[in-house]
Amino acid sequence: MKVIFLNSFKKDLLKITNVKEREQVKTIILEIEKAENLKELTNLKKLKGYSTAYRIRIGNYRLGFYYDNETIEMARLVKRNDIYKVFP
């Protein structure tokens, strides 16, 4: 799948200081790039009320992204209690 990183995602990624959590995010991103469809991804949940919004659980963080026509737009990567305030 084609992956696009939005500026908000890049800023959120720079805020993560824990090395272990950064490695987990890197692993998930590589997994997403290799996947041929969304069913191959783990810890994935479609957000109710939005046709293209999804989130992936990564420890205490949530990765919010949009999926449309084999393209994934990585939008946000924030702590679990803040994800629904800033995404979608």
Image (spheres, rainbow, N blue to C red):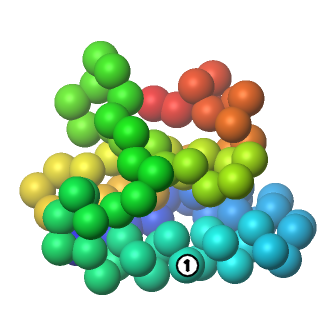
- The answer to whether 17 appears left or right of 2 in the picture is right
Q: Residue placed at 65% from the left, 72% from the top?
A: 24
Q: Is residue 25 visible?
A: yes
Residue holding disc 1: 27
Task: Name the residue nearer the viewer: 82 or 31.
Answer: 31
Please, which residue is most extreme toward the top here?
A: 49
Label 1 residue SS: helix
Disc 1 residue type?
Answer: Thr
Give residue 55's position: percent from left, percent from top: 45, 44
Quadrant in which the C terminus appears: top left
Q: Residue placed at 41% from the left, 76% from the top?
A: 31
Please, which residue is most extreme toward the left here?
A: 69
- The answer to whether 18 appears left or right of 40 in the picture is right
Q: Is residue 8 visible?
A: no
Give residue 60's position: percent from left, percent from top: 74, 47
Quadrant in which the N terminus appears: bottom left
Task: Name the residue nearer the viewer: 57 or 9.
Answer: 57
Q: Residue placed at 46% from the left, 65% from the top?
A: 5
Q: Is residue 73 above or below residue 29?
A: above
Please, which residue is most extreme toward the right here?
A: 17
Q: What is the tally of numbered marks visible in this picture?
A: 1
Q: Residue placed at 25% from the left, 38% from the top?
A: 52
